[in-house]
Amino acid sequence: MKKHIFIVLIIAMVALAGCEGGNTEDQTTGSPYKGGAQGIIANFESFGVVENGVPTIYEDETFPIEITLKNKGEDTVEIGKADIALKGISGSDFEGIVTQKANANKLDGISEFNTLGGEETVDFGDAKYKIDLKTSYYDATVFASYKYPYKTHVAVPKVCFKEDLSDKSVCNVEETKQVFSSGGPITVKSARETRAGAGLIAIEYEVENVGGGEVTKPDAEFDSRYGQISFSLDETSNPGNWECKAAGQDGEARLVDNKATIRCKLNSPMEKKTLYTKQIDLTISYDYRDLIQQSVRIKSKG
């Protein structure tokens, strides 16, 4: 009997502790995005019959140069915006091909109803080697540089707007927050909310290039020394109430070693007794560039 009473008391104490600990709301929520570290990926279609691991043709044959683009992120790339340029082979050595083309169809991002994303195969023609072979074979390597505009959408679901930091209820200001990024080669790895003065808060976003390619802000030149992005808060987040900078620059950031920090701070102090949570949405805009390659062996018929 005493043992039963003891167990009941333990259960009651645990339940009471749970009630007393419920001063702040649950900070976890599900992601509104599919996520992922890819945007547009490109691959060469086969050049010919594979011999000893290398696509191989004879010198009097042609080989097709076709590149398949697949959108594995969540942004959409419109018609003509994914530019592809062939490199690594001389126009004086090959005939039958064009060296620059763009997508002829819209490349939709992945979604609940399109889990594979948009796809298109771009045809550059049938290449023929024009030079008489003096050896038993020649190995040519075809490169393709491709670039496209893209956006990453970022959500921090429960930013704490609390004027009185001595109030321990509802939410916490000084802490790492849940953050979700839409699928793309630029992502936010973490977000932290901090106090930024009397009645002020700030959110710090740790941004990273995870796609393996180069990044620059929209319509800007690529720079081998660093990456660049543009960013802004969405209208739903009242951007006029915030000042968003990275290393002192408004709305632009440089990525050094593929990383950058964006800091968004409230412009003016909150009113007395302000206490609520709100989702803050950020959009990162950029052009992205990557490079692929494929070799082909051209054999002599002699």
Image (cartoon, rainbow, N blue to C red):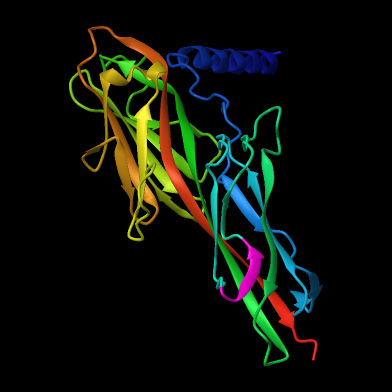
Q: Main secondary structure of the magenta part?
A: strand
Residue placed at 64% from the left, 48% from the top? 69
In the image, residue 257 lies in the stretch drawn in magenta: no
252 sits left or right of 280 in the view = left
49 sits left or right of 203 in the view = right
Picture layout, residue 295 above or below residue 282: below
Residue 261 occupies which quadrant of the picture? top left
Tell me residue 212's x, y (percent): 50, 56
Residue 206 occupies which quadrant of the picture? top left
Residue placed at 52% from the left, 42% from the top? 81
Tell me residue 28's x, y (percent): 52, 25
Q: Quadrant of the C terminus?
A: bottom right
In the image, residue 94 lies in the stretch drawn in magenta: yes
35 sits left or right of 268 in the view = right
138 sits left or right of 164 in the view = right
Residue 168 in view (yes/no): yes
Residue placed at 75% from the left, 70% from the top? 62
Q: Nearer the viewer, residue 205 or 67?
A: 67
Tell me residue 140's x, y (percent): 63, 76
Q: Nearer the viewer, residue 180 or 107?
A: 107
Per the rendered image, the range of residues in magenta is 92-97
Picture layout, residue 170 above or below residue 69: above
Picture layout, residue 17 above or below residue 68: above
Residue 179 in view (yes/no): no
Q: Nearer the viewer, residue 222 or 234?
A: 222
Tell me residue 98's x, y (percent): 60, 60
